[in-house]
Amino acid sequence: MGQLDLTNEQLLTTTRAVRKRLDFDRPVDDDLIRECVRVAMQSPSGSNAMTMQFVVVTDAEKRAAVGEVYRQCYEMYKGMDGVYAGSIKKETAEEQAQQDRVATSADYLGEHMGKAPALILACSSAGRVDGVPGMMAASMMANVLPAMWSFMLAARSHGLGTAWTTVHMMMEQQVAEILDIPFDEVQQACLSPLAYTIGTDFKPAMRPDPESIIHWNGW
């Protein structure tokens, strides 16, 4: 598949978390993944230090193993009242309906993560952020988080779906062991499935007015 015919704004506003509409049966070519990483490498990187790293998991056994860890973590996540998407209550019926759709979609991925033809782990080789000062943690993560979002935008432009999740980090070391990631040196930041989407017609999500999150000239 070539690139989708999307304007910049359409790309930015329709790169959704895709879970139920991932095509688990269609393989994703390695060269296409490389192309998404190439785009991701153009994201901002503090001090021009390329500390973002991508672990691409296509091996079926390793995908299944990571998927099982994710499933176990997701079960723990579902017990976190007020954090788990399904436990969050919204003010209006329309907002609650959207929240319920998010929860059932996330539940689906909780059971099927390992079936995606590729799993993408965004990592930082700048070291771990456990207990480091806020400025250092923010700087270290600032090199990998924009790169992962750029990867996701690139994936969307090629008809691929992704879903940003950190749930697996409740058992981050187990995932590191499966994938031979040096846990003491490399900080995992995000896990995403990668697959072609079933249809490409995604739309912007319902969001509040921008003024609801803007603080002019101070909090």
Image (cartoon, rainbow, N blue to C red):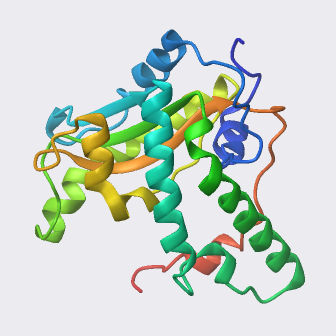
Left or right: residue 133 compared with residue 109: left
Residue 59, quarter of the rendered image: top left
Q: Position of residue 159 (x, y in %)?
A: 70, 26
Left or right: residue 14 compared with residue 55: right
Compared to residue 54, the image places residue 145 above or below, namely below
Left or right: residue 214 compared with residue 108: left
Q: Residue at x 13, y 60 (%)?
A: 136
Number of marks drawn: 0
Q: Residue at x 49, y 10 (%)?
A: 31
Compared to residue 137, the image places residue 21 above or below, namely above
Question: Could you tell me which quadrant the C terminus lies in?
Answer: bottom left
Q: Position of residue 103 (x, y in %)?
A: 71, 68
Q: Residue furthest right?
A: 93
Q: Residue at x 74, y 32 (%)?
A: 197
**Residue closest to the eye, 210 or 94:** 94
**Residue closest to the eye, 48 or 121:** 121
Residue 212, quarter of the rendered image: bottom right
Question: Could you tell me which quadrant the N terminus lies in?
Answer: top right
Q: Position of residue 139 (x, y in %)?
A: 20, 54
